């Protein structure tokens, strides 16, 4: 049923209701009735709101007719006063959250305000239906001698405009959502890291564990896994170092043996050969033949060329080692990790709801970039020094070259670290600008949506026509002037008049709307909207106050201007001339004979 979908209780009040006052034909009090309103799931607010609704009617008699005035008051249940009932349940973005999610304290502060009803009043064969907000709602007209006991009334809660205190509970819900999202991201990162760890992809695993630890610093598991990975990486570095040392030692041994053979050739000492016969009776010493002059010259030339070739190979090898150490970022695993971390720190993950949250995340990333840059320089320089120390430094020349290589490696490591840090900061700055743009676009969309709904709630009205059969001497209106081109701007301005009175002419007619619009031109910038008419001044002032309050809440500056009310109604008063402020203007060729019934909306904001 549609009524069940709206989840509201219809109050049908009939003749049996007790009257009050001395004149039971004029007043009726229908007493308190419980009423329950369930908010549609797509709207944000209390899921269910309960009231004690108290309707009363009175008949106001005029010269030739009477009006039925309906007043509705309500007492809303709350956490501290749960009568007739109170349910700790809140709708937010299509989901319901209860006391088990956010606790009970947020529910102590929230309550519905500005309750609107759909009221139907029936008298005889006449019936009127309106959306009303409680006090002084006019139905009719009926005959002057109408009896209140013959009135039938049906009242149901139509919608609730505002919920006070909802900011507190919605913040709690948003915090819960962020925690859940963070937990989900943490679990995904741990799963990726474990998979890389099992495949011995140490850099990928360590990077994922570091991100998970940043999301949840209180968890010890990713930190312990990082320590295990660093131990494995240290073993790899040590194994490589031992292998290089062994390779260098073997090379030096081979070179030493070669040099020894060459030195023996130029030895001045004769080479003797000991021989023993079978009976060990005697030993003979043989003298090596001395080289001739030609052989010496030939040997000198050959040895000089060999020394030149050896020196050239040593220099080429030294340059090659230097270039390899300087150009490669992966000689030391610790340096490689820091370099990868610098790249990763140039990224921002997640969605930020405000510029403050974004700036906090950026500051953390900047500090991390500086720390990783320092780590990279230290680890890279240490790796180069360890490798150079393992090379030959037995001669002053070799030792000097090693020290030069260490110094050059440190300088280039610092330069590469600065470059990586700069790239990370530039990437982070681009991420910052993107996030700020997203936040600003979200604010603009929300601002336009709220202001559009505000203008829809206070549409253009008009003045009574002869066909409306209005017997009141005066009607009440107010006007506002708003330039819709500024609806998306952060700060906008609206010009709002006071509530002014429009008196009827002596012939029973009211001024035309066009004549009043002409006098309002130039009092503000934008489209002129006349709100009303109202036959009751109090109702007009309530609507005027509601519009002003809502405009200010939507960051619209209200600039008041004053419209003078017309003179009181006088049957003998002549129609004003065209120069009078309340000129009648040109009468339209065709007037509508019946006021258009407002389209019924699901709620005040037409969500």
Image (tube, rainbow, N blue to C red):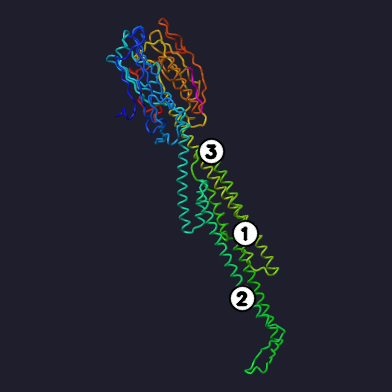
Q: Residue at x 46, y 57 (%)?
A: 198
Q: Quadrant location of residue 77?
A: top left
- Label 1, label 2: how many angstroms apart (C-alpha)? 29 Å
**SS category of the residue bearing label 1:** helix
Q: What's the mark number on residue 603?
A: none
> Looking at the image, is 51 positioned above or below residue 412?
above
User: Which of the pair 28/161 is nearer the observer?
Assistant: 28
Stretch in magenta: 492-498
- Quarter of the picture containing the N terminus is top left
Q: Earlier in the sequence, mark 3 or mark 1?
A: 3
> Looking at the image, is 254 positioned above or below residue 322?
below
Q: Quadrant location of residue 536?
A: top left
Q: Quadrant location of residue 462?
A: top left
User: Dot 2: few (<14), some (14–19), or many (≥20) neighbours within 10 Å?
Assistant: few
- Label 3, label 2: how many angstroms apart (C-alpha)? 68 Å
From the image, state whether disc 3 or disc 1 is nearer to you. Answer: 1
Q: Position of residue 369 (x, y in %)?
A: 58, 49
User: Dot 3: few (<14), some (14–19), or many (≥20) neighbours within 10 Å?
Assistant: some
Q: Which residue is mark 3?
A: 355
Q: Residue at x 62, y 62 (%)?
A: 386
User: Which of the pair 506/136 is nearer the observer?
Assistant: 136
User: Dot 1: few (<14), some (14–19), or many (≥20) neighbours within 10 Å?
Assistant: some
Name the magenta segment's main secondary structure. strand
**SS category of the residue bearing label 3:** helix
User: Which of the pair 529/377 is nearer the observer?
Assistant: 377
Q: Which residue is mark 2?
A: 254
Q: Earlier in the sequence, mark 1 or mark 2?
A: 2
Give the left or right position of residue 303, taking residue 211 as reference: right
- Label 3, label 1: how many angstroms apart (C-alpha)? 41 Å
Q: Which residue is mark 1?
A: 382
Q: Position of residue 543 (x, y in %)?
A: 44, 20
**SS category of the residue bearing label 2:** helix
């Amino acid at each position: 049923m549609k009524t069940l979908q709206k989840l509201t209780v219809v109050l049908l009040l009939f003749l049996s209701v007790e009257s009050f006052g001395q004149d039971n034909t004029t007043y009726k009090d229908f007493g308190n009735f419980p009423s329950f309103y369930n908010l549609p799931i797509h709207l944000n607010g209390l899921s269910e709101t309960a009231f004690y609704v108290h309707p009363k009617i009175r008949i106001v008699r005029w010269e030739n007719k009477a009006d039925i005035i309906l007043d509705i008051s309500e007492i809303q249940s709350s956490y501290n006063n749960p009568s007739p009932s109170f349910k700790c349940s809140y709708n937010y973005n299509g989901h319901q959250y209860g006391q088990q999610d956010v606790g009970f304290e947020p529910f102590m502060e929230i309550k519905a305000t500005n309750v609107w009803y759909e009221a139907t009043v029936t008298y005889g064969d006449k019936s009127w239906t309106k959306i009303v907000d409680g006090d002084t709602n006019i139905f009719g007209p009926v005959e002057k001698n109408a009896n209140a006991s013959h009135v039938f009334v049906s009242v149901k809660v139509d919608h609730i405009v505002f919920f006070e205190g909802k900011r507190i509970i919605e913040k709690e819900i948003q915090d819960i959502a962020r925690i859940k999202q963070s937990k989900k991201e943490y679990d995904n990162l741990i799963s990726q890291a474990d998979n890389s760890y099992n495949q011995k992809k140490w850099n990928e695993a360590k990077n994922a564990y570091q991100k998970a630890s940043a999301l949840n610093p209180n968890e010890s598991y990713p930190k312990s896994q990082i320590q295990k990975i660093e131990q494995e990486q240290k073993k790899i570095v040590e194994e490589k170092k031992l292998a290089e040392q062994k390779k260098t030692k073997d090379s030096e041994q081979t070179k030493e043996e070669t040099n020894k053979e060459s030195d023996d050739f130029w030895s001045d000492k004769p080479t003797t050969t000991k021989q023993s016969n079978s009976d060990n009776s005697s030993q003979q010493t043989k003298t090596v033949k001395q080289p001739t002059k030609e052989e010496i010259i030939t040997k000198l030339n050959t040895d000089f060329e060999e020394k030149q070739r050896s020196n050239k190979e040593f220099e080429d090898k030294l340059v090659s080692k230097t270039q390899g150490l300087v150009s490669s970022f992966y000689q030391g695993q610790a340096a490689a990790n820091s370099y990868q971390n610098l790249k990763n720190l140039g990224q921002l993950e997640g969605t930020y709801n405000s510029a403050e949250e974004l700036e906090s995340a950026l500051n953390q990333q900047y500090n991390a970039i500086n720390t990783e840059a320092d780590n990279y320089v230290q680890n890279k320089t240490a790796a180069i020094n360890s490798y150079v120390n393992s090379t030959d430094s037995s001669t002053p020349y070799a030792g000097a070259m090693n020290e030069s290589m260490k110094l050059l490696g440190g300088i280039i490591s610092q330069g590469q670290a600065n470059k990586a840090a700069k790239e990370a900061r530039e990437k982070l700055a681009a991420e910052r600008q993107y996030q700020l743009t997203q936040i600003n676009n979200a604010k603009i969309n929300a601002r336009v949506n709220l202001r559009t709904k505000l203008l829809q709630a206070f549409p253009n009205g008009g003045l009574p026509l002869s066909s409306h059969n209005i017997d009141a001497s005066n009607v009440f209106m107010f006007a506002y002037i708003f330039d819709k081109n500024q609806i998306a701007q952060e700060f906008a301005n609206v010009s709002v008049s006071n509530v002014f009175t429009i008196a009827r002419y002596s012939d029973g007619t009211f001024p035309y709307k066009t004549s009043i619009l002409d006098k309002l031109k130039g009092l503000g910038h934008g489209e002129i909207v006349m709100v009303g008419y109202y036959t009751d001044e109090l109702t007009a002032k309530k609507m005027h106050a509601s519009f002003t309050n809502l405009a200010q809440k939507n960051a619209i500056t209200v600039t008041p201007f004053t419209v003078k009310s017309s003179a009181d109604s006088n049957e003998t008063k002549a129609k004003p001339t065209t120069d009078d402020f309340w000129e009648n203007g040109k009468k339209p060729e065709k007037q509508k004979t019946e006021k258009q019934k407002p389209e019924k909306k699901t709620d005040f904001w037409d969500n």
